Amino acid sequence: MEDQAGQRDYDLLVVGGGSGGLACAKEAAQLGRKVAVVDYVEPSPQGTRWGLGGTCVNVGCIPKKLMHQAALLGGLIQDAPNYGWEVAQPVPHDWRKMAEAVQNHVKSLNWGHRVQLQDRKVKYFNIKASFVDEHTVCGVAKGGKEILLSADHIIIATGGRPRYPTHIEGALEYGITSDDIFWLKESPGKTLVVGASYVALECAGFLTGIGLDTTIMMRSIPLRGFDQQMSSMVIEHMASHGTRFLRGCAPSRVRRLPDGQLQVTWEDSTTGKEDTGTFDTVLWAIGRVPDTRSLNLEKAGVDTSPDTQKILVDSREATSVPHIYAIGDVVEGRPELTPTAIMAGRLLVQRLFGGSSDLMDYDNVPTTVFTPLEYGCVGLSEEEAVARHGQEHVEVYHAHYKPLEFTVAGRDASQCYVKMVCLREPPQLVLGLHFLGPNAGEVTQGFALGIKCGASYAQVMRTVGIHPTCSEEVVKLRISKRSGLDPTVTGC
Amino acid sequence: LERSPPQSPGPGKAGDAPNRRSGHVRGARVLSPPGRRARLSSPGPSRSSEAREELRRHLVGLIERSRVVIFSKSYCPHSTRVKELFSSLGVECNVLELDQVDDGARVQEVLSEITNQKTVPNIFVNKVHVGGCDQTFQAYQSGLLQKLLQEDLAYDYDLIIIGGGSGGLSCAKEAAILGKKVMVLDFVVPSPQGTSWGLGGTCVNVGCIPKKLMHQAALLGQALCDSRKFGWEYNQQVRHNWETMTKAIQNHISSLNWGYRLSLREKAVAYVNSYGEFVEHHKIKATNKKGQETYYTAAQFVIATGERPRYLGIQGDKEYCITSDDLFSLPYCPGKTLVVGASYVALECAGFLAGFGLDVTVMVRSILLRGFDQEMAEKVGSYMEQHGVKFLRKFIPVMVQQLEKGSPGKLKVLAKSTEGTETIEGVYNTVLLAIGRDSCTRKIGLEKIGVKINEKSGKIPVNDVEQTNVPYVYAVGDILEDKPELTPVAIQSGKLLAQRLFGASLEKCDYINVPTTVFTPLEYGCCGLSEEKAIEVYKKENLEIYHTLFWPLEWTVAGRENNTCYAKIICNKFDHDRVIGFHILGPNAGEVTQGFAAAMKCGLTKQLLDDTIGIHPTCGEVFTTLEITKSSGLDITQKGCCG
């Protein structure tokens, strides 16, 4: 039975052509290995499909940030008259034009990924894969043709897909998810977004921003796992900028009315009453499920979590089968982020083929939620810091600030806020940074480095600010929450 | 005169404990008799930083409570001369013989932290650090010493600050918070074109604030173009209205001026809208708009007068040209503009004016952005050139003539080549001079009290505690020699200065790795060394430079150019690839650079950059995936996007 290593088709087979999988494949090829990637996009229940590159490129970060940018530009158009630009308001928005531009960009990226694989002599199969045994995968192409691929090492990087509610009448027939929204040819119109994940908030944010009547329905807290003070400020900002919220509500059914609109019925848990509303589009953003079911993992003996169906791995990303690894969103307990998958993949391949022993460090992973007012963070939330170190050992410095650009534009800056969570004992190690404001991603990245370097509060304060920026507010944080002083920044 | 014999307590008030409050253990033994070696810090194995802090507090206490303190060594002839001098003046001194106390060496160390002077004798008179033997005799000859000795005579203020800009105000507020009686003198001499403004200095009125707002206005023009690609629909040609913008910006500035007045009032800082000039030691003349003169005295002074734009000294420049002092409140659109100079002020102004659709030419004598990384500077320039700004290199204006009056009028500029005899002529509506700035230090009576300035540059040399050669006079901000001319630097140094003077702090302002950003149409952020400087300091072979071009995601759909934005880091190969230079050219460069500057403070290395996870999709993440070294010569143009 046992094949001799080297007689198998490939040194490395990567299942899944998303950010993590492609990074693995390219890295291994660069190290001179024979590599294949298999990738197949199962169409969404609404029939949406896309090309190579996985969630981030096709139905995630890239289209979402571009639509977020479209919404930001809408805000800038409103600012423009204050800055002397004589543009007649209001300016209408054309979904089709935006969607086409975004989709064209995504397609160019799909193409780019294909070319990159070719350049590096990575074999690419557009097939749906499942395990036959622990070294062999069977792939089914679109036409039904089967192919067997064997490899010494296999990396599973199949990612996840949006979850549909299972017990809501009409959810699957009439609802869409983030798999579909970016590929809609026509404007979604009046939209109900169900969920409180960052996907839900980001989608509702840009839909509102381009002028659509948008409602978010959430059962409990927004942005679970993120700092809750920041999360509630994100919501506050959205609410004051036109997004409607139905909090403490859970949908019970969706029906199509004769005029084509969707009638949604929900239950309000605070009043216990049922209510209905009509929408053009219902978007489910209630979480994601790992794409493991069709892989026949049991044939290879790869263990998954019974609760989440995610794959269980050790710190070297190895599954229960030593030569089968898993990275990215499909793995239990990992941050579901593109750059994490990429780095984990590259480090894994360097360990496999490059003689490295460096492990991936999943601590202090920075991230940004691209809501209308962006929220960037790295390190611990205030709750987590208190839970780990105790209230009396944590010092939180914070400030409400006003971005200079907001002044002349007459924008409200009530939610522009930054806080740094530190240990209280000198030298006051920085545990977490939370930034709510324009360009939060750009602001957060460098400070993530600082935290990686073990920055103390004193070191951050010794950094000279760049004037006038929003990020300088971070190096000017002087007011602690404990002091009870007013954290509003005045003057410069 | 009696010489103090070795091992003697010296001619001071030996045995008289000057600081009873701190107890006899340390206080009384300060001037202990021979044979009993004194300790100033607590004995035993207590934590050394605590002991050091205690010692420092003790020394500061001694200085604060004594009329004269001499830190001396019993065998030192210079110390002896100083002791004799005070003795001859009939002044009683506290003398501490550092060779006769157990921890004399530590005292000397702490003293050098406080005073930046490592040697003895080290003399304080009425809390003012006079210096060593030579300085004390100089002060005696100039009369300053006598003045200092009389100082128990009450001064009007603890601190007078000349200049109400970023540095002066931060110093004033901090000193007031520490309970001191503080005055700020601020007076804006109108520009040759008659422009004047309120409290807050350059940054708020004619610098960072209005320039970033005008930059933002220009960025909005770009955003309007982009927005069509993102589905926003409007067909009309959008015009820019200078007056609307300027009015809005000036309104914001007025609110800031008002905010500063208010915050001084809240902290009980006396604010006087008068021109301050030293007339004698510790005394200043304040002249208001009406010419009325008032005199004020203070124990200590801070000079924070900043700088003003330089003129060319050619025919017609002061009559017809404007500077950044005038541009931001210009009541009419400047029209076709010639910007003279290649400083960041020049490029920023040219950038936003072009962004409004104006015809802009920049006349450059030699290089762009002197002092900045020249590769970056050239990229900044070429982006501007591609976006419609014309550059006239290697020319200098020789004459400006008015052809027509008006708002704006018409000016003829004659310029000559810096290399040959070629001359050119051009007609512009506005000529903006941005060739540099001069320190406001020559007309504030510094010569009356002997504060030295660099005669050539007008800048004030200070030691690392911002002290001038006259002990009770300090300086902060743009007028400092060899220090960055940046608002946050002035704010930081002003604040730390006040904390050192009046608080319990020893922290000095750190002028290393100060980040900054040039708000040109494509922003340029940097921290640490330029490539040229790094090569000069560390040698090329000891450096590894990583770089890449990048394409911001927002630019793709907008159809803006690829392979234009650029990131570069300079690493020291022999110090763990420590990052010693950080450079980024791209949107939001300021926002990106700030955090990396903080990381550089914490010893950022290339390895740490590689280990840090990017935030996707941002521009900042490009620094976490830098792979190509400059020395490899590999292609850095981008074809695809991520991964």
Image (cartoon, coloured by chain):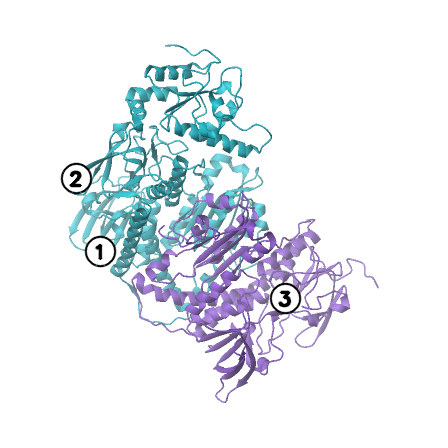
Element marked by disc 1:
loop
Q: Position of residue B279 (x, y in %)?
A: 23, 30
- For residue B230, say whether it is visible: no
- Of labels 2 and 3, the one closer to you: 2
Element marked by disc 2:
loop
Chain B on-screen colour: cyan
Chain A on-screen colour: purple
Chain holding disc 3: A
Q: Closest to the observer: B149 or B435?
A: B149
Image side of residue B394 versus residue A472, left or right: left
Instruction: Read off the residue under disc 1.
Output: B331
Chain holding disc 1: B
What amino acid does circle 1 point to?
Pro
Q: Farthest residue in the bottom direction? A: A258
Which of the labelled discs sits on residue A159, or is there none? 3
Instruction: Read off the residue under disc 2.
Output: B292
Q: Closest to the observer: A465 or B274?
A: B274
